[in-house]
Image (tube, rainbow, N blue to C red):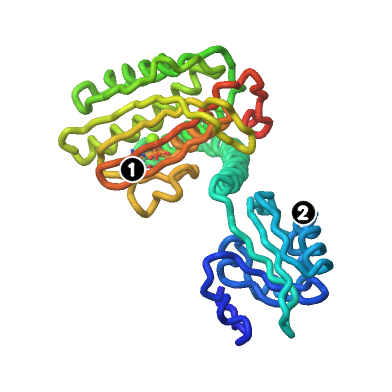
């Protein structure tokens, strides 16, 4: 968003940090492009608003603003979480400094924290994912019922047709209805409640490996780089197998489709310490990397591969990664993906101390 910068603030425009200026009444008189980017709101919208309304319920910030203006000295608040009026949360460090200007009396400078950046992104992803799952579920229900009616009617019609040659048409209706039906079933079925039990991640990986080798014995070399000292996690074995299989199978398919010479898939496990996942801190997590040296994820879908129905393959359902993500989230873990031609890596983090695992309401019911 381009904002007409009043001349007196023009220097601030080029700063990478986020700057917000307030007048005597705590109203926003200026926000720089850095702040627009970090907080994802537009200057036009926010200018003139009370800072209390831009970041509602943020007492830490309000206290800093009050203290700085009363004591006429800078105030710094370290690493706190701030939520915008659009309900987005960010972890920031903020310095509030009184200034002597006819147009503004306080300057707020925000720096976004890196580790926290990921948390905010994860939260957004989780919300997005839950919305996706719900949308899909509703859509599948809505489609299933009329589909049954269509199919039934086509069958009745078929019996009444005067000429058998017309059956070709009713058969198209019936076959296509069946195809849609099985897609809807796939959307709805996998959401049984997870069964948690001590699970060895390497057993999961070995199972996926043998399934893949059975599917396409010669196509790829599957390398294992395991940290065998990893403890078991409390998880749903079948769902973990399905999640890893969906990811690994995509890799095999991608490499096969391009006939990548020296195709290679690698499973690597490591321990990752002090991990924060969905705002909860864990002492240890399993880091599982699934890497391939295939062509990479097509650039036009790279940002959306976890969304349902996004597929780069003809005939693909675009559900494999959506399901994988749902299953991993049910284990309070997360998936990330990096991809370039010649190197694609899906990283899964699974917390180990999941004795506290509680069904995540939204994920379970999906
Ligand atoms: N390792 C990979 N290499 C290249 N492309 C990939 C890889 N993993 C996923 N993709 C792309 O992501 C898309 C979405 O995958 P997925 O959700 O499993 O749906 P589907 O396999 O039904 O297309 C795939 O169609 C493919 O284009
Ligand atoms: Mg797939």
Residues packed near mark 2 inside 10 Å, few (<14), some (14 to 19) or many (20 plus): some
Residue 258 in which image quadrant: top left
Question: Which residue is at a point 40% across and 36% down the rendered structure image?
Answer: 346
| Foreground pick, 58 / 350 | 58
Does the beta carbon of the residue at mark 1 sit less than 8 Å from ligand 1?
A: yes
Question: Which residue is at a point 50% across and 17% down the rendered structure image?
Answer: 237
Which quadrant is home to the N terminus? bottom right
Residue holding disc 2: 60
Residue 10 in which image quadrant: bottom right
Find residue 360 and report its horizontal and vertical position in percent: 66, 30
Question: Which residue is at a point 55% across and 76% down the rendered structure image?
Answer: 13
Residue holding disc 1: 313
Find residue 357 and report its horizontal and vertical position in percent: 64, 22
Which quadrant is home to the C terminus? top right
55 sits to left or right of 248: right
| Foreground pick, 247 / 333 | 333
Find residue 32 and report its horizontal and vertical position in percent: 60, 72
Question: Which residue is at a point 70% across and 75% down the rendered structure image?
Answer: 47
Q: CA distance from mark 2 to mark 1?
A: 50 Å
Residue 218 in which image quadrant: top left
Q: Label 1: state its secondary structure.
A: loop
């Amino acid at each position: 968003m381009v904002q007409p910068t009043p001349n007196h603030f023009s220097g601030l425009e080029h700063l990478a940090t986020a700057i917000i200026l307030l007048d005597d009444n705590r109203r926003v008189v200026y926000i720089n492009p850095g702040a627009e980017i970090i907080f994802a709101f537009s200057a036009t919208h926010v200018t003139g608003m009370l800072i209390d309304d831009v970041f509602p319920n943020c007492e830490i910030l309000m206290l800093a603003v009050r203290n700085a203006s009363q004591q006429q000295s800078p105030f710094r608040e370290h690493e706190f979480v701030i939520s915008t009026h659009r309900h987005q949360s960010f972890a920031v460090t903020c310095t509030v400094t009184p200034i002597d200007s006819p147009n503004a009396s306080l300057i707020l400078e925000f720096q976004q924290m890196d580790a926290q950046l990921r948390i905010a992104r994860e939260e957004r992803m989780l919300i997005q994912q839950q919305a996706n799952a719900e949308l899909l579920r509703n859509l599948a229900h809505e489609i299933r019922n009329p589909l049954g009616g269509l199919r039934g009617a086509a069958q009745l019609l078929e019996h009444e047709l005067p000429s058998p040659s017309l059956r070709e048409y009713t058969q198209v209706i019936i076959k296509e209805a069946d195809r849609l039906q099985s897609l809807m079933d796939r959307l709805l079925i996998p959401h049984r409640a997870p069964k948690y039990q001590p699970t060895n991640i390497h057993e999961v990986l070995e199972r996926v490996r043998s399934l893949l080798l059975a599917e396409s014995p010669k196509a790829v070399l599957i390398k294992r780089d395991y940290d065998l000292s990893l403890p078991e996690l409390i998880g749903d074995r079948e769902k973990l197998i399905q999640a890893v299989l969906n990811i690994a199978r995509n890799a095999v398919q991608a490499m096969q489709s391009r006939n990548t010479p020296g195709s290679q898939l690698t499973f690597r496990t490591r321990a990752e310490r002090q991990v924060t996942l969905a705002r909860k801190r864990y002492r240890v997590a399993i880091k599982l990397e699934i890497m391939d040296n295939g062509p990479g994820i097509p650039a036009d879908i790279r940002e959306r591969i976890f969304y349902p129905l996004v597929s780069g393959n003809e005939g693909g359902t675009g559900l494999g990664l959506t399901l994988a993500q749902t299953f991993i989230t049910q284990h309070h873990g997360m998936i990330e993906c990096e991809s370039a031609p010649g190197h694609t890596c899906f990283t899964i983090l699974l917390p180990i101390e999941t004795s506290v695992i509680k069904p995540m309401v939204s994920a379970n019911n999906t």
